[in-house]
Image (spheres, rainbow, N blue to C red):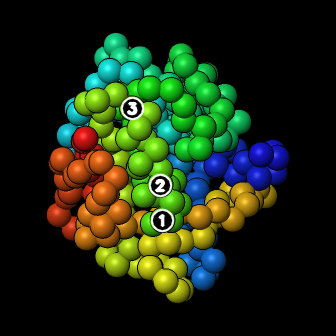
Amino acid sequence: MDDSEDAFGHALMDYSKGRCSYEMVETRNGKIDVTSISYYFRSFDQWPSMEKNAIKHATGKIIDVGAGAGRHSLYLQNLGFDVIAMDISPLAVNVMKNRGVRNVVLGGIDDIHGSWDTLILLGNNFGLLRTILEAKGFLRKFYSQSSDDARIIAETTDPYASGFTSAEGYPGELEIRVIYDRYRSDWFRYLLVDKAKLMDIVEDTGWHVDKLYEMSGVDVYCFVLSK
């Protein structure tokens, strides 16, 4: 990733240095969503209840993908877990190291190797599975490489409820980019799923939806997949 493309990383780094920063997400069909980057630095007591409940299911060797500023990794690390924090943003990796995350890897969803017990895809990171077809493929791969009692702890957004939709096909199969200041990421595929579509994706992958956590009036929800 060129430095000019690391919009997310620059936003994280600026915030970590005490500067006001934001994350702008743009879809191919022109919808724009702007949020404060402070979201990625929240302590456990500031997390929504559904996130707090979901992360309680983490066990064993843990991989946190799309770890951002490392809030989930730091929380689990402080509880004594063996955690690998991964992000494709070089600056995000630097931010996590500066914040005390011990085991940080530059990489993404395609770079998961070796056996593990828990995969963390919180912070809407089920979207990193890109498309419905690819999500099924990833889940089958994760099934074969993980321990017998492995879990996936994830979060996604209902595209129908959020209005954050694509122009054609399933509305949650998006193409987006991240913008911050003068920095622009490349366009990349990102998946949002409603609960019915989640059940369809999980079917025949070896996983099942074990727990579902949601909050009234919120279009985001968390879930736990078990074998």
Q: Residue at x 50, y 26 (%)?
A: 114
Q: Which residue is mark 3?
A: 146
How far is disc 3 from disc 1 in space, using C-alphas? 20 Å
What residue do we see at 69% from left, 65% from top? 187
Q: Residues within 10 Å of mark 3 (few under 14, many from 20)?
A: many
**Mark 2 to mark 1 CA distance (whole Å):** 7 Å
> What residue is shown with label 2?
137
Outermost bottom residue:
168
Mark 2 lies on a secondary structure that is: helix
Residue 151 in the image: x percent, y percent? 30, 37
Location of residue 4 with respect to 203 vertically, above or below: above
Amino acid carrying label 1: it is Leu
Image-quadrant location for residue 143: top left
Task: Report whether residue 58 is seen.
Answer: no
Residue 37 rendering spot, x and y as whole percentages: 53, 48
Residue type at mark 3?
Answer: Ser
The residue where tag 1 is placed is 133
Q: Amino acid at mark 2?
A: Gly
Q: For the residues labelled 3 and 1, say whether their Cβ atoms are less than 8 Å apart.
A: no
Evaluate if marks 2 and 1 touch, with contact meaning CB atoms under 8 Å apart. Answer: yes
Left or right: residue 39 compared with residue 153: right
The numbered mark, 3 or 2, whose residue comes first in the sequence reads 2
